[in-house]
Each structure stands twice: as structure tokens, then as C-alpha cells.
Image: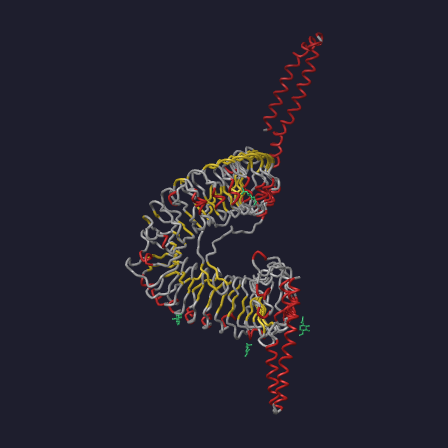
Amino acid sequence: MLLGVLSKRVQNIDCFTFSFQSSYLISPLVFLSMSVNMKPSLLLLIFLFFLGFLTTTTARSCLAVERDALFAFGAGMNGALKRMSSWEEEEDCCKWEGVVCHPTTRHVVKLKLSERIQQHHRGQVHEINSSLLALTELNHLDLSYNYFYNVPFPKFIVHFKKLKYLNLSSSFFTGSIPLEFRNLTKLRYLDLDAALDYGQQHIDNLDWLTNLSSLKHLDISRLPLTNLTDWLLPSSLQGSLNALIMRDCDLKAIPVSSSNVNFTSLEILDIYGNNFNSTFPQWVWNVSSLTHLDLGSSGFYGTIPEAIGGLTSLTYLDLSNNSNVKGAIPRSITHLQRLELLSLQGNRLSGSLASWIVHLTSLTLADLCDNTLNGSIPTGIGKLSNLTSLYLCGNQLQGSVSEVHFENLTRLEDLDLSYNNLKISFDPNWVPPYQLASVQLMRCEIGPEIPRWLQLQTRIQILDLSDNQIAGTLPSWLWNLSSSTLQFLYLSSNQIKGKLPTFSEVSRLQELRLDTNQLEGHLDDFFSYNDSSTPVESPTQSDVVLLSLANNFLEGGIPLSICNWTRLLFLHLSNNSLTREIPYCLGESLKELETLNLACNHLFGEIPRTIGFMKKLGRLALNNNGFSGQLPSSLQNCTNLFYLDLAYNAFAGSLPAWMGESLQRLQVLHLGFNNFSGNIPQQLTQLEELEILNLSNNSFSGSLPFCMGNFTAMALTSQYWYTNRNGLFSTTKGHYIHGTPYSHYVDLVISTKGQNLHYPYDSELTKSLDFSGNSLIGEIPRGIGRLKGLHNLNLARNHLSGRIPEEIGEMESLESLDLSVNELSGNIPNSLANLNFLSYINLSYNNLVGRIPSGHQLQTLNDTSSYMGNPGLCGPPLSIECSVDPTVHEVHKMKDFEWIWLFIPMMVGFVMGFWTFCGFLFFKTEWRYAYFRGIDSYYDRILLQLHLCLARLNRQD
Ligand SMILES: *[C@@H]1O[C@H](CO)[C@@H](O)[C@H](O)[C@H]1NC(C)=O
Ligand SMILES: *[C@@H]1O[C@H](CO)[C@@H](O)[C@H](O)[C@H]1NC(C)=O
Ligand SMILES: *[C@@H]1O[C@H](CO)[C@@H](O)[C@H](O)[C@H]1NC(C)=O
Ligand SMILES: *[C@@H]1O[C@H](CO)[C@@H](O)[C@H](O)[C@H]1NC(C)=O
């Protein structure tokens, strides 16, 4: 409404000024021509001059119709557009923010509305108003990074015939790109990176690009192009294109033949993050104009060909993360004399560095981590004077590294030599020529002293000396945190001794890992406050996001002052000797916490109710402590929990139904070795993402959840990788990022195959269901056969009865099956022989009968203890032979069993009959005499019959 009124008012002013100005300007012209006697041609010239003057001055404002169009467009944004005061206050739309007009015609020619929708307004726009089409002269349209979501792709843009620049990246529109798009023949720059939302209809071809023969820059990254088989553009486009970017498109096919490839001016080719499963295409090495080539993470295999040496203009080369690229790095790579950035990380490249790297004199960044490179680091590397980043981690490099390697590397900032077979040995008095920002020297045989040259480095932000042999106490120069630039300090897995020093809140540290050392002392001393001070009023706050003091010898309670560390996301204090209760304030204060690991201490008390405030908590490990009480109902607020380990405590009470309803993200639930009781709630089977469920060694009763087959994640055979945050290295568009590595120490113990196996945090999960050691009754539900992805099933030591369901043979991934010590009866189903991965089976101490099935994998499991305690079982691996016809044996066994049923009615009949009979004898004296007279003669005959009967039975056995 307001906008409408405003635009009308502005329109009126505009008309007024125009008429006023024209009359004002034309009259002097008439006057001039009348008063001065000039040549007509000169007059015409002057006239034209004034006409030009007139148009420029009169059209000071933008065109009304275009301004209306912009208003309508803005109004269509439902208020989601960032407040831009100029759009509300300024009348001339050419002066509006993001609007550029032609200097003379005053037509709007550019619209730059990148990042105009703020995060909390995302999703509020419903469509892009086609009123924009009134901007007939538009040649530049930028709507990037507005995250529209659920807004249809604005098909009307195909009518902007003059468009040269179009940027719709990160728009996440719905729908598809119309074929008429190819009418935008003037386009020179097109960026459609994530222009469509994921999961939109697949784009099958690139016909909508066919006529765009002026195109120089084309980015169609993150579009749904999976089905595209032939994405080579028409040759008319190939000739003009400078940049072709198709990152993360999940493309499966790459043109292999060179015959229809003729890129003559392509400088940037970026197809990172696809899924080609192919060798490197030959044609790429012929595009000699390339300066930037990114073929990383795209499923290439084979070797890097010598032909790469032809790309002599390259400054950027990324072939990283194609895990099947192997062989040596071709010597021809030394021809790439302009190469500044080289990333070959995450392949299986072998050979030595010496033959080539020293010749690439322009290198500023080299990332060769995670290959199988061997040999020593050549001293010539010191000649690469422009080198700022050198990453050689995770190879098989040998020999010692000393100051001669680094003599001329004056610009070096980032160094990572971790995980090789290197020995770092510097002259203690050496003064390095560089100032490093990050130093990563994990497992480099450093120690027992920290290299002294590090003391001279005054700009270090990341220092990782984990997994060395550093001993002694923490040097004070390193722990001088208040004046240090350190942001990430990792000294895990060393032999650092002594008292844990006090932490200084004024440091810039964001991550501190001192885990797996031999530090002593009280946790209270580390947190410097004493517990009596009220943490809420305390002014200082630490910036630490990750704190790991796990695996040391720390004592004392968790001090209240930890509640000041409100930025914490990851807190690891496991494997110490901590005592007392979890502070009540922890939940209220550390609202950002994602991981709380207090496992393996001597903590006790209940889980504080305040845990419900930690809404972001994903991982909670309180196992192996002395916690007790019931689970607080506020725990159901922690809906992001995906890992919950409370095993080996004294928790009691029943398992609440909300656990299945609220904690829907759970992947790991370990409640084993507690005192939980009651029924297992059916709702638990609603946890579709659950991969590990352990309720073992509690006092659960009742039957197994009937719908056990609903555990969807256990039903899927696909191998999931447990949520893994260790993205060590990644390249993003145009930038190279070498991430900071940190892993999270949570060790999961799963008892499978008759033993306890430890699973480090980021290992692949063994999908496991363990209900052993409870008092469960009833049958094993047939639905269990649906858990085709389950690796470990343990129902041992319960009172389960009935037969083992035939469907168990459908659990095709099963590796370990333990049903021992139950009351299961009947035969062992033959379908067990279908389980090809079974490597452990225990059915001992049940009432199973009949021949043990054999064949396939079962044949190899010939441990007799798997079957002992089932007297009715026969056949290998037991030494008890089955009778010739196994069915006879079975029938006989069944007969034994049926005897009872035969016997009971017989007994009842006998008792009834006896007493009726005796009753008569008792009351009728004549009958009694008559009876006892006759019985003497019969007695011997009956006794004989009985003996004969027993003898026959014995023979049958
Ligand atoms: C696209 O161009 C073709 C011919 O060049 C024309 O027939 C068609 O109408 C145009 N489509 C649109 C939507 O402008
Ligand atoms: C590639 O294109 C250029 C000019 O655009 C042309 O001269 C050359 O013959 C073409 N080569 C092939 C193999 O088509
Ligand atoms: C090092 O970089 C500078 C620019 O920073 C450049 O002028 C020089 O040529 C480079 N040296 C080598 C050997 O490439
Ligand atoms: C659980 O969440 C609700 C809603 O956000 C909140 O009102 C309540 O205080 C929370 N409970 C606890 C114990 O944190």
C-alpha cells in the first residue's frame, strides 16, 4: 500500500519536472536562432547539442515504469529482502543500492541483489515477480546466495534478451531450467551453482545451453545432472569458453574420446566431486590453454600420464582424493614451471619426491598427504623459495629432517610432516628463516624435548605434536598462553608428566588436547577458580571449543567453574580418576555442547535434570562410572543425541517410552550392565537410525519387542560410516583449505564373537543388537529376519523359549550369533547354513534337538562348545551320531517328550478310578471281602505283565 502511494507520488513529480525543464530549455534555443544569423548546419549542430543536454538532464531519475517494476519485485519478496533504506527513501531508483542505470538512457541495466535475504527470512519468498521484465535493457542480473527454497525457477528470465551476466548460484529454486534458456544468446557469464534445490527433477541434457555461443564462464555445479551422459558442449560453445565448472554434480559419465573435444581457450576446468569411475580422459591433457585444473574427488583411477607435462600454463592442479590413482608421479610434471598450487593428496601415488618436486620452483602450496610416497625428503626442497605451505603427511617418507631442508623457505607458513617414518632432528641452536602459522608434526619421533626452534616462532596458531615421545613437564614457554598466538594446541599421546598447570582464560586457545599423557593433579586447579565463587557472576570466559584431558591421572571433582566455559562444544574427561557428581550448572551453562565424554571415571550421583538444556548434545558417554538413579525425563529434550553410552553404571528404573519417541536420531544406545528393569518398550523400535542397541546384563523382563524388524538402519545392508567430523582436507571453489584435524576420543566397546571389541570413534560400525543377560521370556519374533544388515545378535542368558525362527537365515550380514543359555527348543533351522559371514555361533545350553545343520559357512564353525548342553542334538561337530534316518531319531525323541502327555491323563484317570472303586469297597462290606479274595490270584499276573512291559521299553531304547 505504502509502496504504491509512494511510487505514484514520485511519478507525478517526474512528469512535472520533465515538462518544466523542456519548456525552460527550448525557449532559449528559439531565442538564439532568431537573434543570431547563423548557418543552418551550425544551427542544427547546436540544436543537437542541446537535445543531448536535454535528455541527460531531464532523465535524471530512473524510468517510472522500471521503478514500479522494482517496487513490485521488492513487494513480492514478502518483506524478506534485507532492509535497504535507499529503496524506501530515495526517489530515483538509479541511486538505489544494487541498481545500476545506463548513464544516458537511465534504463536499469544491472541488478545486483546477492545475499539480500537474511537467514531468518529464508523460505518466506513464494515467487520471483515477473514484473522485472519491464527492465528491458537489463544485461546483468545477480540474485545469488539468496537461498530461496521452494520458489519456482523464474522462467521469465529467458525473455531478457540482452542479458550478458546471470548469477543464480545458491538459489535452491524448485522445478527445472526451461529449454528456452538457450534464447539468452548474449550471455557471457552464467553461474547456476546450486540454482536448483537438491532432489529436483534430473536434468537429462544440456540442450538448454546450445545457442549460448558467447558464453565464456559457465558454472553448473551442484545441479541434478546425475543422468547426464554426454556433457560435452556444442563445438560453438567449446571455442569461446574460458571456464567450465561442474563441481559436485554426481556426474557418472565423462566423455572419453577426444574426437569431438575442441576447447581452444578453456583456462579453468573444474569437475571436482563427481563420480566418473574412469581413467583420466585423454582430451584433458590436450587443452593447453588450461591454467586451473581440478579433477579431485571424482573417482578417477589409473596413473597420471606423462601427457600432463603439456599443460605448461597450469598454475593450479588438483587431482586429490581419487583413491585409486596410483603409480609414480610422471617426471614430465617438471614442465609445469608456472605451477603454484599442487594437490595430489588422498591418492595412492608412490615413488620419491626427489626427482621432481625440486624443479617446480613456482610452488607456493604442495599437498601430497595421504599417499604412499617413499624415500627421503630432498634437501633441494629448500630452494622452493616461494613455498608457503608444505603438506607431506601420511606417506612412507623416511630419513631425518633437519635445518638444511628449510634453509631458504623464508615464506613457509604451514608445515605438516605427520605420520611418516621421519625423524625430526634440528640443531638446538638453529634459528629458522620463517615464522610458521601452523606446525603439524604428529608421530615424527620428536622428543623427549620439544624442538627448541619452536620457541622462536611467535606467530604459531596451530601446533600439533601429538603421538611423539615428548616427556617431562609442559615447558612454561609453551604454556605462556596469555601472550601466545596459539589457537589450537594438541599434545595428545605423549609422556608428559607432572601437574596439570592452571589454564589462563585470556588465551586465544580454541582447542586444547592434552589427552593420553601422564598428567596429574586436581581438575579444580586447572580451572583456576575455586568452587565457592559463583560461576554466573564470573566475568572471564574462555573461548575454548574443544577440551580434551582424557586418559590422564587427574583427580577431584568436575569444578563448578567449568560452567564458565560456555563456548565448549566438545568436552572429553574420560579415563581419569575423577570423583563426585556432575555439577548441576553444567547443563544450564554449556548449552552449545555437542560431546560430553566422562566415561571411565569414578563419578557418581544422578544425571542432573539440567541436561535437558543441552539441546545440541549429540554424544553423551557416561559409561563405566558409578552413576545411579533413573534417567531424568528432561533427557528427552536432547533430541539431537545420536550416541548414548550409559553402560557399566548402576542406573535403575524402567526404560522410558519417550526414548523411542523423542531420541529419534540415536545411532548408538548402550545401556548394558546397569539395573534397568521392567519391559522393553515397543516404542524403542521407532528408532530407525539405530545401529547399535545394547541392553545386556540388566533385569529386563517380558518379551522381546515384537516389531524388532522395524530397526530400519539394522535392516539396511549398506555400509554406513558413522557420522564423521574429521574432514581433514577440502578444497572449496577457488580457495584451498587445509583444515585443522581433530578426532574425538570415544571408544565404544561392543561384545561380539564372544569377546569385547573396542571401536574407536570414527571406525565403521558393527551393527549390533545385544539383549543378553536379562530375564526375557517368550519367543524370538519372526520379524528378526528383516534385520539383514545386522552383524551381531546376542540374546544369550535369558529365558527365551519356542523354536529358533527359520527367518534367522535371512539375516545375511550376521557374523556373530549367540542364543546360548535359554530355553529354546526344536530343531536348529537349516537356513542358518545360508549365513555366509557367520564366524561365531553359540547355541549352547538350550533344549535344541535333532541334527545340527551343515554346509557352507557352518562347516567351518566346528567348535563343539557352540552346541553343548543340548542333549538332543546330534551330528557333526558333536561326536554323537544321529540314527541312520535322522527323522526316526527325531520321532523317537518326540515320543519321549509325548510320554509325559500320555502319562498325566493316565494318572488322573487312575486316581479318579481308584477312589470310585475304593469308595465302593469301603462302604459295602460284602463286596470288599469278595474283592480281596479274588485279587490274590490276579496280583502275580499283573506284576508279570508290568515286568514284560518295562523290558520291551528298554529294548526299544
Ligand atoms: C526463442 O527463440 C525462438 C527463435 O529464435 C523463438 O521462436 C521463441 O519464441 C523464443 N522463445 C522465447 C520464450 O522467447
Ligand atoms: C578446433 O577449432 C579451431 C578454431 O575454432 C579450428 O581451427 C580447429 O581446426 C578445430 N580443431 C578440431 C580438431 O576440430
Ligand atoms: C615468487 O613469487 C613472486 C611474486 O610473489 C614472483 O615474482 C616470483 O617470480 C616467484 N618466484 C618464482 C621462482 O617463481
Ligand atoms: C525442555 O525443553 C522445554 C522446551 O524447550 C523447556 O521449556 C524445558 O525447560 C526443558 N527442560 C529442561 C529440563 O531443560
Q: Position of residue 797 (x, y in %)?
A: 53, 35
- Visual colour scheme: secondary structure
Task: Please name whichever residue, 746 or 532, is drawn nearer the observer in this view of the structure.
Answer: 532
Task: Please name whichever residue, 677 or 923, is drawn nearer the observer in this view of the structure.
Answer: 677
> Is 744 above or below relative to 730?
above
- Image point (44%, 55%), residue name: 741
Side of 90 relative to 505 (left or right): right
Task: Please name whichever residue, 666 or 498, is drawn nearer the observer in this view of the structure.
Answer: 498
Q: Where's ligand 1: which quadrant?
A: bottom right
Q: Position of residue 209 (x, y in %)?
A: 61, 70
Q: Position of residue 801 (x, y in %)?
A: 59, 34
> Is 113 above or below relative to 461?
below
Q: Position of residue 472 (x, y in %)?
A: 32, 48
Residue furthest out toward the left: 429
Tell me the quadrant of the picture where the C terminus can be found: top right
State which quadrant residue 239 falls in.
bottom right
Residue 292 appearing in the image: yes
Side of 760 relative to 165 (left or right): left
> Is 35 above or below relative to 264?
below
Residue 156 appearing in the image: no
Tell me the quadrant of the picture where the N terminus can be found: bottom right
